[in-house]
Image (tube, grey):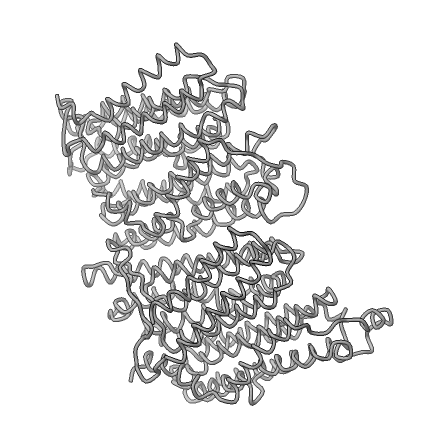
Amino acid sequence: MGVLLTVAIFLPLVSALLVAIVRNSAFSRVISIATSVVVFLIAVYLGLNFDWNNPSFQHTIKLPWIQPLGISFSLGLDGMGMALFLLTALMFVVAFVWSVKIEDRPNLYHALFLLLETACLGVFSALDLFLFYLFWEFMLIPMYFIIGFWGHERKVYAANKFFVYTFFGSIFLLLGIASVVIYGYVVSGSVSFDYFFLKNIQYPLWIQLVAFLLFGLGFAVKVPMWPFHTWLPDAHVEAPTAGSVILAAVLLKMGTYGFVRYSLSMFPEASKYYVPLIFFLSVVAIIYAAMMAIAQTHIKRLIAYSSISHMGLVTLATFASDWNALNGAIYMMVAHGLSSASLFMSAGFIYDRIHSYHMDDLGGLARYIPNLAIVFMLSGLVGIGFPGLAGFVAEFLILLGTYKNYPVWAFVAGVGMVLGAAYFLYMYKRVMLEEETISDYRREKWSHLKDLELHHWIAFVLVLASSVLLGVYPLPFVKLMEHTTRMVFGG
Amino acid sequence: MNWNALLPELVLSIGILLLFFLDLLLDKRHFKLLNVLGGFVPILAFISLFFVEVPAKTFFDTFSVGTFELFGKGLLYILSSLSLFALYDYFLKKNSPYGEVPYLVLLSTLGLSFFMSSDNLLTLFVSVELSSISIYILIALLRGDYNSKESAFKYLLMGSVGTAFFGMGSVFYYGATGSFFLTPYADQNTLFSLFILFFLSALALKVSAVPFHFWTPDAYDGAPTPLVGYIATAPKLALYMLLVKLTLLFSQFKLWLVLVAVLSLLSMFYANFTAYAQRSVKRLLAYSSIAHAGYFLLGVSLSEQILQKALLFYLGVYVFAVLGSFVVLSAFEKQEGFSHHLLEYRGLGRENPILGVALSIFLLAFIGIPPMALFVGKLGMFMGLVKAGLGLLALAFVVASIISAGYYLKLISVMFLEEGEVRFRGSYLSAGESFTLLVCLVFILLLGLFPQLLYTYIKL
């Protein structure tokens, strides 16, 4: 199985090279979609063969790589990794289907997305800190050029900001990795970057405190936690639609994934020590970002702030030291991935048709593109936690778990969810319903608008069907999350 | 006399003499031939390294070779061979086919080669001067160009100051120890402190650390671009080899750590901020190399196996990134009227994808993005610094790296992303340049994924 996992991760890389060599736009489109579908099928196969009663990493592979430095090529998945691996594989199918009509430099576009896919899949399955960092940081290059080449007006600014912010976090992460590896060397006498080796070391408290900060800074920028969040609205506003989808659905999850996989598992005492700090930052993110979202008139910016708010919920629940909360946090990663992806696709569709993201230019669209109005509503409902959809399960678990230990913080998080409903419905009203504000000229122009096309439908159905599945039948997925939770809390 | 220990130097010397006579006999049409022949001389020297029996000493013990020296010499010969292959087309384009170029470059290589093997301050002095004087002439080569002359003169003046410091330091060393041989020394006295102060200043000047960096941007700016790739790499390689040796001997002195730390902090922060103000890409890269001098100096702050090995690895891959980036720059400069202003780079990456991508890979490598090998160097330096208990210096390194990311990115975004008038359309690569560029790229990418290929040869 480990071989299959390796194939799934590096298949996109091979396809990217093929795309770069062949340089034919039809070929790039076909091979990109084919590659992502194959990867997704492998991911599903791995998921079906995942035994959540077996409390260890699965589908593992370990090959010697850089022996003098104790680095090995080591991959494997636990429940959380499996869930995010599936999400990533699905999202790249969606992204490629969505961009099937891209005209501007299609070969480069597809090659970069394929490179990005390898990096993203690698991050969620690496079990060696060197390998993890390699994927983690390599991701920057394709994303930088995706924003920079296919973005909107201020794309260069946004791309540079994205790069510098993320690099700011990850270089601290690199120092953190160096520190724990050296501590392992001092204790045991051998250099190793192996995750299990480093996880099983008992770090003294002060090392945990320092290393937690170094690792945490890297993850916090990616999540992004307040006050490191300012790159995200800019990056989203400027990125092309598929870029936004991947950014919101996959890249942000890397941060929260890192918190669970590394910070929480390797530095348990520091994780308790820093609870007040993390809760404070998370709650500020939840409330502040939700308020910021309400104040936006740019729909993509609004969705970006809503992402920050939701990710605040995830970090809050991650450190609430409760089974249900951690289950909910991981569930929220997936649920938010689905909801934000379909919201960004809706926004991207509106831009494709009307060439504006500003609410002032929009209004009453439900009459002209009714199908979009339906999927847009559904996407929003997933995000605000409507019962029967993925977001509900996640929010319910988070509140349930957080309330047990920290009732006051749980209450504040609940307020954030109410605000979530407020800003989404407000946006929906301005964009889809309110007809009074639009001019006759626009009415005339919009009466010929083309509604969702086949590739839009495929993309939306893939995402929304998954959301419904996660909403009405959460059991297998909660089992997946619990696989990780059990490893973190023991037992 | 143990001639075997001198084998690579003998090969180089014979090659230099041959080239010297060939230059007299052949006329200017054979400039390309001379350069390519010159490029093969270090390759022969490199091959001869395998026949040297180590460890060995000769010249009354002033000259020694061991595995450590072999590592440095190997890299040095590859570097100088690659630089020579990449030179000729630029000089032909500039209409200045001076036949002196190949043997001057090789003379400098010979000097550095002796420098790496010297255990004695006198031979160190002689060999570093052999290399420096060749480089003064190389910088001034473009006789018709005012900038070239000015920068050579500046470099000569600053270099002489460095030489003076070097001599002064050696004198104090003799006063303290009664010998010119570098040996372990434990007695803490004023004379020895003065030696460390002067000698470190001299070396700091040669590796262009702040506050002795002033010659660097001017020298880089005025020198013929493909030669900058050599000037910015080969001497540094040799100097850091010496610094590593000195660290192993003398770093128990508190003064050493303090001086090195101050030099390094000043270099990385001053240079990384100043780089943002640059409009010339050559100057920008000059400041980048000053900042890197700061990073590298961290590697000689304390005697610690992991740290020095990491430094040598970092340096060993860094030199190829620098050489490669200057090859790209010189290929761009072959366009008429190109002066390396940042605006002239607008859209160049889109117009010349191969050159643009290559330069971007080198720039991303400088930032420390994987899978480029410089990131492994950075990781190793972090590990070494943490192991040596210098976590705060590691933190400073991190902060400086973050600051630096912006200006490298600016160049990348100017080349690829910025819209607007594109002033220069394109350039082409000569066979030699493409070869050098390819080797540099392969080195950077391959060693990033398999650092053990180089790392295992680093033996202190």
Residue at 42%, 38% in the rendered image: B322
Give the residue furthest to the top. B25
Determine if residue B290 is in view.
no
Q: Quadrant of residue A339?
A: bottom right
Looking at the image, is A45 positioned above or below residue B343? below
Residue A274 x, y percent position in the rendering: 39, 73
Position of residue A231 in the picture relative to residue B85 (left or right): right
Q: Image point 65% across, 37% down: which residue?
A: B423
Rendering quarter of residue B131: top left
Q: Nearer the viewer, residue A379 or A447?
A: A447
Nearest the eye: B184 or A483 = A483
Quadrant (top left, top right, bottom left, bottom right) of the C terminus of chain A? bottom left
Q: In this image, B367 relative to B199: left or right? A: right
The quadrant where residue B197 appears = top left
Front-most of B399 and A197? A197
Left/right of residue A79 with respect to residue B6 in the rendered view:
right
